[in-house]
Image (tube, helix red, strand yellow):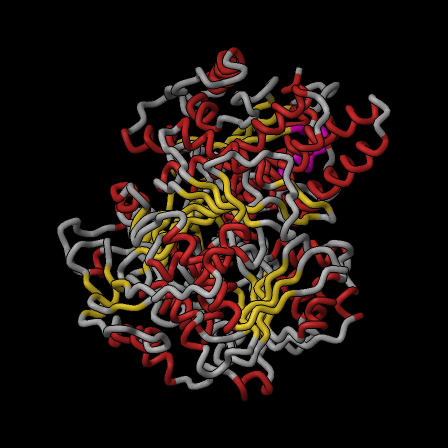
Amino acid sequence: MTQQYLVGELSLILGELQAAAMSAAAVRDVARLRHEAETTPPAALGPVVGRAVELGDRVCRDALTQGESAAFIRDTAIYAELCEFGVCAGLLEEGQTSSDLGPAKKLKA
Amino acid sequence: MAAEQETEVSEAQIAVHWREEGYYQPPATFIAQANAADPALFERFSEPHFPECFKEYADLLAWDAYWHTTLDTSNPPFWKWFVGGRLNASYNCVDRHLATSPNKAALIWVPEPEDEDSNAITYQELYRRVNEFAALMRDFAGVKTGDRVTFHLPMVPELPVSMLACARLGVVHSEVFGGFSGTACGERIADSGSHILVTMDGYYRNGELIDHKAKADEAVAKARALGLEVAKVLVWRRHRGQYASKSPMVPGRDFFVDEVLADYRGRVVEPVSMPAEAPLFLMYTSGTTARPKGCQHSTGGYLAYVAGTSKYYQDIHPEDTYWCFADIGWITGHSYIVYGPLSLGTTSVMYEGVPTYPDPGRPWRIAERLGVTIFHTAPTTIRMLRKLGPDEPKKYNYRFKHMTTVGEPIEPDVWRWYHAVVGKGNAVIVDTWWQTENGGFLGSTLPALQPMKPGSCGPGVLGIYPVIYDEKGNVVEAGSGRAGNICIRNPWPGIFQTVWGQPERFVQIYYAKYCRDKNSKDWRDWPYFAGDGAVQAADGYFRILGRVDDVINVAGHRLGTKELESASITVEEIAEAAAVPVMDELRGRAVEMYVSVKPGVVSSPHIEQKVAKAIETAIGKIARPKNVWIVPDMPKTRSGKIMRRVIAGISNFSDVGDTTTLANPEVVEVIRRQVQAQKVARGELPRQLSPQELEEIKAFGRAE
C-alpha cells in the first residue's frame, strides 16, 4: 500500500511540536521521536503515535506550568491535530489520550 | 461443534472484520462518457497479449524514436521496457499540449490562506517556467544528464516546475516530502549523490508561515556527515522579494531562485531525448533505520503506465478539472498530480495546506469554485473530513463524476459516506491498491465496466496478473476464504527498475521469495512479492489485509498483531500489549500475548482471562492466545519501541538476540524467568527449533 504518507504526516506534526516545545529536553525528545517516526514502517506507527501523544501532553503542560497562555493554546492545537491524525489514520483509538498511555509515562521515569 | 464454528471464520473476517459487501453499479451518465467503456479492453490486455498490450499505453505518448523491443527480460528481474525507444517526459507533459491548448490551465494552485488568490498556470506559462528553470539548473547549477538533484519542497507550483525542468534535462529528481526533517532529507541527499538541493523558504500550514529553509541547513550538515558535500542550495521564495526564514543564507552556497532566474528570462532549453529505460526520478520509502531505499523509476515505462492508468482508471479527459488531494512528495503525487494528468493535457489542481483549514468545508469550497470533476484522496483524509464535518459536502454545489481512494484499505462504512455524501451518490469510486515501488495502480476496478464493492480494491488492473501464494509458494485459490501473500506474476511498465545503488536488495526484497529459478530469463519464473497480505473473493476482487510482517499464521489463519494488541487493550486494566508467535505442535503457530497493566492495577488470572476473552470476542476463537503473560514492563528500545523479537525468543525458549540497544535490558531476565518457569510448570517444555523456525523468531517484529 502507498502508506508512506502516514509517516510523513506524523513527521510533519512532530516537527510542529518540536518547534513549539519550550524546554531543551522536550525539544530533544521530540526530535528523537520524529527520527524514529521517519524510520518506522507505516504498519508499525501506532506505538510511535502513542508516544507522540505523551510528548504532546508534556509540551502542553510545560507551557501551562510556565504560565505561557499563548504557547499553551498553540500547543493544544498541535496536540489536537496529532490526536485527530492518529484516530483518522487508525493508529489511535478514539478517545485515547495521554492519560490512557500509562506505560509511556513509565518510560520517562 | 466448537471446532466447526472456528473454521467458519475466514482469514478475511479475522484480519479486517469486514463482511463481503454488495456491488454498486456505476451510473449510466458516467458510462456514457468513460474513456474505458469497451469490454474488449479486457481481451486486449489479457495474458496472451502480454507484453505487447502495453503498446496501447505507450501510444498515448509522443516518442522521438519508437522502441524495437517491448519487454527485455535478458537480465531478470531488471526488466527493460520499450527498449530502443526515446522520449522526453517534460516534452510529453508540457510542450506537446502547446499546439492545441496553450491557454488552458495545466495547474491550478490553491494557497492555504483563503484570502490569497489561486494561481492558474497555463500550459504556455508552464512551458516558460520549466524552460527558464531548466536553463538555470544547467547553466548556473551545472547539472548534467544523469545527475541527481534533491528537492525538499512543499506543495507549491515550483515543485512540478522543478520536476519537469529536471526531466527536460534528463536529470534524475528526488523529491523528499516537505514535512520531513532536514535529517531525513540529508540522508536521502547522501544516498542519491545529489550535489544540488532545491528548497523553499517557507510555506503555509494551519494558518502559519512555516520556516522551511532551516531544514536545508540540517540536511546539508547531515549529508556532509555522511560524506556528501552539497554544492548549491537553491531557495524558492513563497512570497517574491520576502524571506520567510530566520535561517541565514550561506554565501556562495545558498541562492534565491527568483534572483538568479532574472538571468534566464525567456531562455528555451531543448528537451533531451532520453532512452525509455533512463531513470526519471527516485522516490525514497521510509521505514528503516538502515540505508534509505530509493525506488528508481524509468522514463518510458513509468510515463506510459501513469498515462494509461490515468486515462482508463482515473477517466481523465482533457476537459476535466482533476484534483488529487495528496502531496507530490509521495508516489501518488508524482504519478497522479504531475506526470499522469499532465501527460494527458488536463488541468491538475494542487492545494498547499491542511485539508481542514480553516474549517472542514474547505475542500468542498475549492471543488465548487474550481469545478472539480475528479477527486482523489486517501482514507485517512476521508475519515478526518467525515469526523470533523460530516455534513459539510452537502453545503456546496460541486459535482464529482469520479472519486479515487488510495493509500490503505478503506472501511465499507467510510466508503459509503464517501460515496453517498462526498460523491452525492453520483460519482463512481475507484479504490486502488499499489505501492511506491509500482509506479501506478495494480488493483482496482475499471470504473465503467466493473462494479464497485466497498472494502475491496477490485481485481488486478489491465495487464496486471496478481496471484496469492502461501508461504510455500502454493497458489491460494480465489473464493477459498484463505489469505496469503499477494504477488504479481508479470512485469509491467510502471514497476521500479531497482533500489538506487542497491541492486542486491532489490532482488532480495521483491523477487527472491518466490523466484522459481534464479537462472531463468522467463518472466514467469519471477513473481513480484508485494509484501502485503490479501484474500481474493470468488469474483476475483482482492481485499488487502496489510503488511505480511505483522501477521501470525495460526493453522493457516493470518492474524494481525495489531488487531490482537488492539483487542487486548480494550480490557480496561491493560496499558500495553504485544503479540508474538510460539511454535505449536498442533496448529503450527499459536499466539502468546504479553501485557502490562495500568499503574495501581494488581495482576491476576482474572485479567489474563479477560484479555483472552476480549481477543476471542473481537477476532474469533482461532485467535485465542495460548498464554497471556502479565509482565512488569516490556523490553523496549530507548525510543520506547517494544522489541517483539526479544519476547518471541523468550516464549520459544530461544536466543533473545542482542539486547544492548534496550533501554531496560534488566527486564528481559525478569520476564524470561517468570514466563519460562510457568511454562515448564504447565508442561510446555522447550524443544529444539529447526533453523527455519529460529530464523522466523529472530525475524519477528522486523516491521517494528
Judge whether B362 appears above or below B396 on screen: above
Depth check, front residue: B457 or B110: B110
Res. B481 visible in picture: no
Residue B214 picture quarter: top right
Determine whether B66 is above or below B142 in the image: below
Q: Position of residue B190 (x, y in %)?
A: 38, 36
**Magenta segment: does it hold B76?**
no
The residue sitting at 52% across, 63% down in the picture is B337
Q: Kindly identify the residue that appears in the image at 74 percent across and 61 percent down.
A: B362
Magenta-colored span: B567-575
Above or below B292: residue B537: below
**Residue B573 within the segment the image draws in magenta:** yes
- The answer to which of B348 and B437 lies nearer the viewer is B348
The x, y position of residue B125, in whole percent, is 53, 69
Q: Residue at x 50, y 55 (%)?
A: B261
Q: A60 or B193, which lies in front?
A: B193
Q: Position of residue A14 (x, y in %)?
A: 63, 36
Q: Nearer the viewer, residue B174 or B390?
A: B174
Residue B549 coordinates in the image, percent (x, y): 43, 41
Spot the residue most to the front.
B263
Q: Is residue B114 left or right of residue B51?
A: right
Q: Can you tell which quarter of the image residue B572 is in?
A: top right
Q: Is residue B580 left or right of residue B291?
A: right
